Image (cartoon, coloured by chain):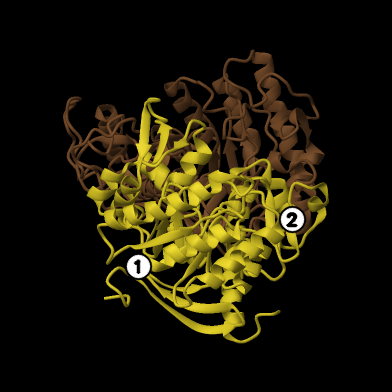
Amino acid sequence: MEFTVRACSGHGRVGSLRLASGLEFETPSLLMITRRGLPVVIPPEMLMDLHPDSRACQFTPMHFLEDPLAAVVAKAGGVHKLASLTGFAMVAVARDSLGNEIAGEEASNLGASFETSSGRRIVGLEKYMEVVNACKPDLWVSLPDEVPHWVPEKRNRESVDHTSQWLDHCLSLQHAEHGNRCLGVVVGAGSLEERARSAEQAATRNVAGFSLAGFGLGEDVAQRGFHLEVAIAKLPNDKLRHVCGLGSPEEVLQAVGAGIDLLDSTYPYMLTKECLAMTFPLKMEVPLRNADRDMQPTPDHGVASGFSLAKVNLRSATYGGGRIDETPLVTGCKCYTCKRHTKVYINQLLNSNETLAQTLLEIHNTYHYLEFFKAIRESIKADKFHEFRTWFTSQRVFGMTYDVSESFVA
Amino acid sequence: MLGISPSMALRFEVLARHNRARASRLTLPHYEALTPLFMPVGTQGTIKGLTNDQLEDLDCQIILGNTYHLALRPGADLLDTIGGLHKFMNWPRALLTDSGGFQMVSLLHLADITEEGVTFQSPVDGKPMLLTPEDSIQIQNKIGADIIMALDDVVKTTTTGPRVEEAMYRTLRWIDRCIAAHSRPHEQNLFGIVQGGLDPQLRDICLEGLVARNLPGYAIGGLAGGEGKDAFWRVVAQCTAGLPEDKPRYVMGIGFPLDIVVCTALGADMYDCVYPTRTARFGSALVSEGVLRLTHAAMATDYRPLDSSCTCMVCKRYTRAYLHTLVTKEAMGSQLVSYHNISHMMQLSRNLHSSILEGRFPE
């Protein structure tokens, strides 16, 4: 595995990551969410062509702890073969970002508490590494003792100690022939000192990179910024940095701005579940609009126009006559859904509770988010990341969530 | 212009026969299909989570939309304004819509059938509503499918007594009203439906009446509802014998592979059923040996594909064991099984067509 930093803009950097499998892609990169190895709603055979960058996925080892799936993935020879996703990067992230809580309160020397298919249980080191080794991921996160920022000092210190010990233990159990693929976890949520300590310890280990944990747990945004900064300052520049728990556009920008290279994000899927289509503009050249909450949406909102519309809600209650919206979710979008289907059609699918609606929405939302990551990388290469971040954040402040009880018969 | 008579919008050419079975080409306004064929049921204009690309990859030639559901949502007028269901869904191949009557009778407990039409309670506001033959055809004209079905008076095969006869005669009276109401005979093919329950005399009368109307195609209705197999096959045999050779024959509601093979042997060409996708939702896969229950514990250690003779995406990529772990836990599980089940039915259709064509149907 090789990681090379290619360009910088502030602390943000574009890198190229070349995995042992030969797959190469640019960072910062989005890791798409999977469950038990497969995308949640996107047909697996459509994943390759979804977008030029749709090559990297995350998965949770916790789903593979028990039989029969534990045995099945071992017999298949790893998660790539199991899910027929050879040609993809599969990154093992312990934290299940689709909503399950982290340990927080409980842990022991033996392992941390996680939600598994058979309920919450302590996952020990041997078991964790057994699963990791059976899955053969391209990159994997060491077993974390991840706690939120409000735990007592003592517990926080303990989490730093555990995490560091478990990193060593995981490294001792990794399969040699799989090479150096470990992302060492850095915790320390409640205290900047502990955060620095955790990072210092991880930095000395022989790892491929680092995974910053303890975020996305209700912490103050400014505090999060300090934690990211403090941790990254202690980490070597030439190794990968992943963060879990952060996924919204603003969080991505904050993380990238601090120097993060990889994020797994449920943001597209969260929108899909709420019947929302991602429509925020991606090009800085588009002028900012003034806040105008009474403005009627035009059909041509999205990538091509300046309209500051972050999301389009596709659930509609009424058809009242008038104009039917036969435009795609985002005009000009080149995703499968936008090239083939209209808002009014997807609306109909949603109102009929058809699962195809989720599939089509998720394809678009994932595509759009990959385009967002691409725009981030372009801005870094042009040394304009700060401007991009400022532009994006300010236009989002003005953007309204266009609630479509508004139908596509407007 | 298609067809040989002014009221047709299709061409049907029998390419080969084996006894009573036929392999044919059915040319419709939107697509040239090969029969025998199975039509997956798409309710709202989509087949349970599958994209258009997937449906084309699977070789689906004609898909079925339910008029009742489409009329409710998004509504016939909206579809009309957009230019029809094909355009709405962006489906480039053929579509067939049912009359709406069957769904009402099966879904709405308070449905009642009179000479006027089917009366029911509106699912939206509970008010009494009426679906007449004219209404059904007008709605189907707006939806714009290649094949539309006449509104028939359908009774269960387990029904006995004068009701069966009443329903058969009413179906004949209604076909004339459907024909009169049909405003797009050059673009949409109106199929009549043969009724008459299990009574051969009633079936004969219905056959004669419908054949005399010179419709583009015919369906055999009122079956697959609890009658015994022998009775079922007997009625199908009688109907195919009484229907014209040069027009397509559609047995409605048939989805078990064995039934399709037998009906094909008896001279039928088209089939539809929700069974393949419905059974997928319960974790059952259709395979050459029969039905595979993926939820069964034995599947957990079975590393074979669903069906070793199937070339679909699911069988190429995934094992029974993996699918077993998915089916009860992830939506993707039943999605994949649905995909395979449709593939199975399409493969069956292709096999029937090519085996008749190549003179090896008995196998």
Q: Which numbered dot is residue B48?
A: none
Q: CA distance from mark 1 to mark 2?
A: 35 Å
Q: Is residue A155 above or below residue B138?
A: above
Say which element carries label 1.
loop
Local crowd size for mark 1, using a 10 Å CA cut-off: few (<14), some (14–19), many (≥20): some
* Residue B195 x/y as whole percent: 51, 55
Q: Is residue A219 left or right of residue A401?
A: right
Q: Is residue B286 left or right of residue A280?
A: right
Q: Which numbered dot is residue B292?
A: 2
Q: Nearer the viewer, residue B129 or A23?
A: B129
Q: Is residue A171 left or right of residue B100?
A: right
* Residue A241 x/y as whole percent: 54, 42
Number of the front mark, 1 or 2: 1
Direction bottom: furthest residue: B359
Q: Is residue B189 left or right of residue A322?
A: right
Which of the chains is brown?
A
From the image, tell me which residue sits under label 1: B30
Which of the chains is yellow?
B
Q: Amino acid at mark 2?
A: Leu
Quarter of the image where one finds residue A186: top right
Q: Nearer the viewer, residue A94 or A150?
A: A94
Say which element carries label 2.
strand
Q: Considering only order in the chain, which callout, 2 or 1, is on the residue closer to the N terminus?
A: 1
Report whether residue A28 is seen.
no
**What subunit carries mark 2?**
B
Local crowd size for mark 2, using a 10 Å CA cut-off: few (<14), some (14–19), many (≥20): some
Quarter of the image where one finds residue A106: top right
Q: Quadrant of the C terminus of chain B?
A: bottom right
